[in-house]
Amino acid sequence: MSEPTPETFSWQQPGGRLTSGMVTAPSRLPSPPPPPDSPEQAPGPDGPQRRRRQMLIFAGIAGAILAIGLTILLVLVFSSGGNPFRDKASGPADLRPPLARACPPPNASPSAAATQAPSTLPPESGARTVDPDAGISYKSYGAPWVSWNTVWRAGTLEVPYRVGQHFVTEQYQGGEYHASILSAAVPAADNDGGIADLECVGRQVSADVRAEYYPQPNTMEAIRDELTTLGGRPAWVSEFRLHFSQAGLTATAELSAVAVIDVGKPTAAVLYVSIPNTHQQFDYVIDDVFKSVRVP
């Protein structure tokens, strides 16, 4: 920095006298002091802190996405009629036939004790109807009886009658009315020994016959309902006469019988006979055909 240049000036003292002197004056103003230092900026977060912050952000985004997904899923489930908080998973479906479900293999049923080895019977002569599926054969009759040539699955149990004889007794507004001798095999047992609860199966089939094969309402006159043997094999026989009335139908009653026969297989044989009261001359067929049953 340069030295200041001396300057001389005078002024007049009181009383008129001049006084001289020397003062020092700077040639320029001194430089202003430097501005105070600005405060230092706080250092930014280090690496670990930054990663934690990023993780929190990502977690929040993921939680929001999950909540939205669950909301959409619940809306779809409830709109379809389900209730995941109340409905329980159902057990495996029972795929056994209706008779096997209704009549399990007997342990101490009334018909269990009657299941035994077949008796030896003399062979039947004359015309025979053979039902290989049912495992039985029985007597065939001449005119007006003719062979059954279709499959009739009637009633809730849908017993599949494929073999037998029949004839049309009358035509009416509902179609044709028949007398019939029909046989079928029903899967009535689910054990390897093929032992069926004959009483249970017989009652089930007889109830289905009454409820599904005839005009409703009807009344029943029971004739027999018993455990017996047919063809040397255990059998349950139900015989009854049904009374009914239907517009346009001449028949007002029918003699019917159902035999369920243990043939030593998982299936039981069913033999169903029906004779309308317009043809009572054929009532004898029920006892006759039952006596003729043979199990090969």
Image: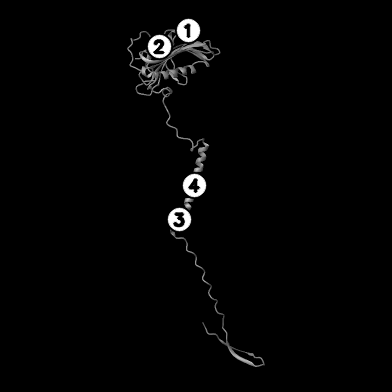
Query: Hey, which residue is sitting farthest top in the picture?
Result: 281
Mark positioned earlier in the residue sequence (3 or 4): 3
Q: Which residue is mark 3?
A: 52
- Amino acid at pointer 1: Gln
Check whether the beta carbons of the residues at disc 3 and disc 1 lie within 8 A of each other.
Answer: no
Give, as a three-letter code, the residue at label 3.
Arg
| Label 1 neighbour load within 10 Å: few <14, some 14-19, many 20+ | few
Disc 1: which residue: 280
Mark 2 or mark 3, which is nearer the start of the sequence?
A: 3
The image position of residue 13, as x and y in percent, is 65, 91
In the rendered image, which residue does mark 2 sit on? 290
**Which of pointers 3 and 4 indicates the residue nearer the eye?**
3
Q: In what element is the residue under mark 4?
A: helix
* Mark count: 4
Question: Which label lies toward us, 1 or 4?
Answer: 1
In the rendered view of the protein, which quadrant contains the C terminus? top left
Q: Is residue 75 above or below residue 264?
A: below
First-in-chain label (2 vs 1): 1
Q: CA distance from mark 1 to mark 4?
A: 81 Å
Left or right, 214 with respect to 267, comes to: right
Q: Dot 1 lies on which element?
A: helix
Q: Callout 3: helix, strand or loop? A: helix
Q: Secondary structure at mark 2?
A: helix
Residue 177 image position (x, y, % from top left): 50, 12
Q: What is the CA distance from the residue labelled 3 to the residue labelled 4? A: 20 Å
Amino acid residing under circle 4: Ile
Mark nearest the camera among 4 and 2 is 2
